[in-house]
Image (cartoon, helix red, strand yellow):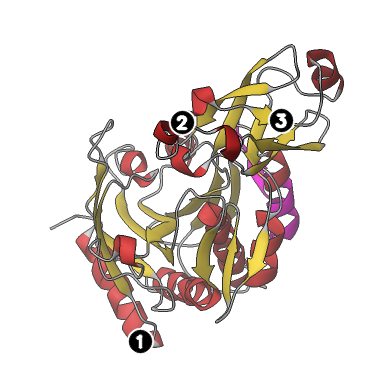
Amino acid sequence: MIADDLKALMLIPGLSGHEGRVAAAIAQRMPIPCTTDRLGNLIATFPGTGPSVMLFTHMDQLGFIVRKIEDNGLIRVHRMGGVPERALPSQSVVLSTRDGRDIPGVLANKSHHATQPDEKYSVLRASELYIDTGHSTKSAVEAAGITIGTPVTYAPNVIDLAEERIAGTAVDDRAGCAVLLDVARRLAKRTAGPTVHVVFSTQEEFNLRGALPAAQALTPDIAIQIDLMLASDTPDASDLGDMVLGGGPGMSLYSFHGRGTLNGVLPHPALVSLFEGAAEDKGIGLQRSAQVGVLTDLSYVQTVGQGVASIDLGFPMRYSHSSLEVCQLSDLEDLSLLLTAGVERIQPDFKLERW
């Protein structure tokens, strides 16, 4: 079921601020009705006793916003989120119109035969790139439904790789969404446990906008964020840690953005112990992460009210923010089992104080 949900969600464009189609697909798959708020967060509550838990992940993906349509029909864009400029030329994209159509296009790459020697090893800024949809005039582009403000994402793609690994668009964080759907189905069958608010948040890639208002409304005692964790099992990332595909879910012990927003998360010690114990009891491999350059919604959710006991859990993923990211299904399945087992261990007397 996780595989089916993941593949279906990866094929739905959902730029930050334009997550409606993704939210509708998730709501259709949820075992109980969901509500939404003014930022578009999707929320489902499973009542219980003891401390309340906000279990959340983001629905949106990064991409671009149309900023100008040239007279010759070529389209200029702004980046939305941490799009890697060195990986952009020649990528396939879709421009999603207001009436739900996806117009194909390509991020142009200068013809090799016209490229000068001093250009061959340079990276163009996104502002210098343009999208070619095949239309030859501005009026033709506009007649197709493309205007300033139209969202643009990598063309949806799913590729089944060896060893139950999946490559494709928006593994970050449709994989998290697929895991939470699986957890929600398990929660719907339980007979006891804490109140759990399952939240699929919006605009994470756009400066972490959606989850904070959801947390302010729900006022949880505990927050558990689900997102990717940088795999370090490739030559270009081997010095970043010991996170490997197939090694099981991950737990962050330290995250710090280190640029722009000087923010991060130091997890609540009781939650670290709780998930360590749950992993040991269930025989689940639990990998550990300590990363600089990482920032999640939890950085802000943890400061709501009197403070929220918080922890980041996730799955190892390669090639973050590329048009083709890679994860392994067994890690997602074990993450769902870990979350379910961990939440079951939260009793009414769970210690919320840090010391």
Residue 116 falls left or right of residue 30: left
Query: Looking at the image, which residue is at 32% across and 42% down?
Result: 299
What's the residue at 29%, 79% (across, down)? 277
Mark 2 closeness class: few <14, some 14–19, many ≥20 residues within 10 Å: some
Residue type indicated by callout 1: Asp
Residue 354 image point, x, y percent: 17, 55
Looking at the image, the residue that sits furthest to the top is 71
Can you see residue 208?
A: no
Rounded to the nearest angstrom, the CA distance separating label 1 from label 2 is 51 Å
Residue 303 numbered tag: none
Considering only order in the chain, which callout, 1 or 3, is on the residue closer to the N terminus?
Answer: 3
Relative depth, front residue between 222 and 142 = 142
- Residue visible at 83% across and 14% down in the picture: 139
Residue 9 image point, x, y percent: 67, 56
Q: Earlier in the sequence, mark 2 or mark 3?
A: 2
Relative vertical location of residue 129 with respect to residue 12 in this rendering, above or below: above
Query: What residue is disc 3 on?
Result: 132
**Where residue 51 appears, x then y in whole percent?**
38, 57
Q: Which amino acid does label 2 sit on?
A: Leu
Q: Quadrant of residue 207?
A: top left
Pointer 1: what residue?
A: 281
Quick one: SS at disc 3?
strand
**Circle 1 Cα neighbour tier, 10 Å, few/some/many (<14 / 14–19 / ≥20):** few
The magenta stretch spans residue 308: no
Query: Is residue 301 visible to the viewer in this orientation of the structure?
Result: yes
Query: Where is 298 relative to 79, above or below?
Result: below
Q: Is residue 38 magenta?
A: yes
- Which residue corresponds to mark 2? 124
Amino acid type shown at disc 3: Asp
